[in-house]
Image (cartoon, rainbow, N blue to C red):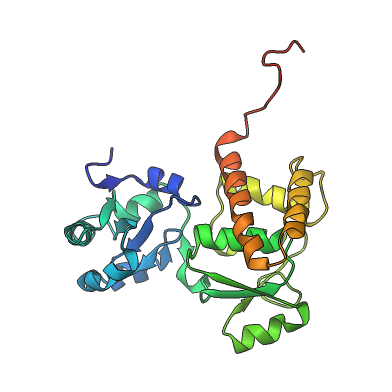
């Protein structure tokens, strides 16, 4: 059981993927990190001996600090942040405990820069993928929506990563859609995301036999695209849809609904 000012890996994992996810800061030494150069989803690397420099970027945010074993570097960094008015806890057991719990870790070398670009007028994959990146990889990521013919040139000129377009690195792979590809490459596979991925793939590739929820997701996605002329505004609205779908996949799959309650079958 986690002690005061600590959070267990399992409880932190329940926050990741939701709007309530805290800022996660990995202060492990370079030697420890290089032995396993992966991050807890959404975590940022920051040197423990320069923790003061982080404060301006995390004001009014909840912070979880982790290191190799969740000992002196985590406790010292979190205490320093608390002394400067930041609500900070440590991850109980650190990265070792997280790995032992078999929870997802994102390979650092797989994380592109913070800017992504894709085709304008998104429907399914081009909303689902930004949701996945912001909730599990980089909460500060930005997304550019441009005409299909401009995606490659914009990626080059604006140092952005192209996705969900033909002949780029982050796109469909066989029967899998871009959302599936990102989950695999980022090492994010777990039951809730895998369930959501099936729904996204089913809706995005018009294979509604894979998941009964696909028709509803398609209808909502088309409706959103009709409601919003601005793609970024549509993405912001779509984030709420995928937040809800993730919570359904994680906690609500066994819940049905009927009226009146207890109606005879």
Q: Residue at x 62, y 29 (%)?
A: 254
Q: Residue at x 49, y 73 (%)?
A: 109
Q: Nearer the viewer, residue 109 or 196?
A: 196
Quarter of the image where one finds residue 32:
bottom left
Residue located farthest toward the bottom when viewing the structure as drawn? 157
Residue 188: horizontal and vertical position, in percent?
54, 56
Q: Residue at x 27, y 67 (%)?
A: 55
Quarter of the image where one finds residue 38:
bottom left
Look at the picture and state if 241 lies above or below 125.
Answer: above
Q: How many marks?
A: 0
Q: Residue at x 55, y 48 (%)?
A: 190
Left or right of residue 215: residue 105: left
Look at the picture and state if 174 lies above or below 113.
Answer: above
Left or right of residue 241: residue 1: left
Look at the picture and state if 193 lies above or below 150.
Answer: above
Residue 176: horizontal and vertical position, in percent?
73, 59
Left or right of residue 111: residue 223: right
Give the quarter of the figure containing the N terminus: top left
Give the quarter of the figure containing the C terminus: top right
Left or right of residue 113: residue 164: right
Residue 60: horizontal and vertical position, in percent?
32, 58
Residue 214: horizontal and vertical position, in percent?
76, 46
């Amino acid at each position: 059981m986690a002690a005061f000012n600590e959070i267990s890996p399992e409880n932190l994992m329940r926050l990741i993927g939701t709007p309530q996810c805290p800022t996660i800061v990995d202060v492990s030494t370079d030697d420890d990190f290089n032995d396993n150069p992966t991050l807890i989803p959404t975590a940022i690397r920051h040197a423990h001996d320069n923790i003061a420099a982080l404060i301006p970027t995390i004001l009014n945010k909840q912070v979880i600090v982790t290191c190799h074993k969740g000992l002196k570097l985590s406790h010292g960094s979190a205490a320093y942040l608390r002394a400067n008015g930041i609500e900070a806890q440590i991850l109980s057991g650190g990265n070792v405990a997280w790995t032992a719990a078999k929870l997802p870790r994102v390979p650092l070398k797989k994380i592109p820069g913070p800017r992504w670009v894709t085709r304008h007028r998104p429907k399914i994959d081009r909303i689902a993928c930004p949701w996945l990146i912001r909730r599990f990889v980089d909460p500060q990521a930005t997304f550019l929506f441009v005409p299909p013919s401009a995606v490659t040139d914009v990626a080059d000129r604006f140092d952005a990563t192209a996705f969900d377009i033909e002949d780029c690195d982050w796109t469909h792979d066989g029967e899998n859609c871009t959302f599936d590809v990102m989950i695999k490459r980022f090492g994010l596979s777990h039951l809730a995301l895998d369930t959501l991925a099936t729904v996204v793939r089913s809706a995005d590739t018009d294979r509604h036999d894979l998941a009964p929820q696909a028709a509803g997701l398609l209808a909502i996605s088309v409706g959103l695209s009709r409601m919003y002329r601005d793609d970024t505004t549509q993405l912001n609205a779509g984030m709420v849809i995928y937040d809800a779908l993730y919570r359904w996949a994680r906690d609500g799959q066994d819940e049905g609904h009927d009226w009146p309650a207890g109606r005879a079958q």
